Image: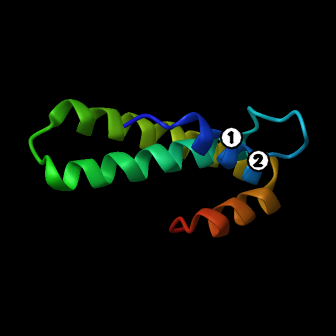
Amino acid sequence: MSITKERKTTIIGEFRRSEADTGSPEVQIAMLTHRINELTSHLTTHQKDHASRRGLLMLVSRRRGLLTYLRRQSPESYVTIIRRLSLRK
């Protein structure tokens, strides 16, 4: 259920702002979205896994906070990341 090292480096490479960037809000949102998608597919087959459901809700909340921050700081990046990740907004 965790992200493999190869997948993590591809996500970072795809969403980073500069060469040394690994912690910008865009990268964090992309990582959380990947984990959310994995957990969502897990919960479709394991409906009674309430611990994973709680973890999913925490990840969604963290992503929502980062998106709110990004919308305040840089509206153009917010719109870009929403489109690239095809999130509903």
User: Distance from label 2 to label 1 (Cα)?
Assistant: 6 Å
Secondary structure at numbered mark 2? helix
Instruction: Identify the disc placed on residue 47.
Output: none
> Which of 8 and 51 lies nearest the eye of the viewer?
8
53 horizontally vs 5: left or right = left
Q: Residue at x 15, y 37 (%)?
A: 49
Quarter of the view holding residue 41: bottom left
Q: Position of residue 89 (x, y in %)?
A: 55, 68
Mark 2 touches mark 1? (CB < 8 Å): yes
Instruction: Check the image and report above or below for 55 versus 80.
Output: above
x%, y% of residue 8?
A: 61, 40
Q: Amino acid at mark 2?
A: Gly
Q: Is residue 88 above or below residue 19?
A: below
Where residue 13 appears, as percent x and y from the top left, is: 76, 47
Q: Amino acid at mark 1?
A: Thr
Dot 2 surroundings within 10 Å: few (below 14), some, or many (20 or more)? Answer: some
What element does badge 1 sit on? helix
Which residue is the site of mark 2?
13
* Left or right of 24 on screen, residue 49: left
Q: Which residue is mark 1?
A: 9
Q: Nearer the viewer, residue 62 or 12?
A: 12
Relative to 38, is 87 above or below? below
Please give the name of the residue rendered at 51% of the width and 36% of the height, measured from the top-left corner. Answer: 62
| Residue located 21% across and 30% down the image | 51
Check the image and name the residue furthest to the front.
6
Relative side of 56 to 13, left or right? left
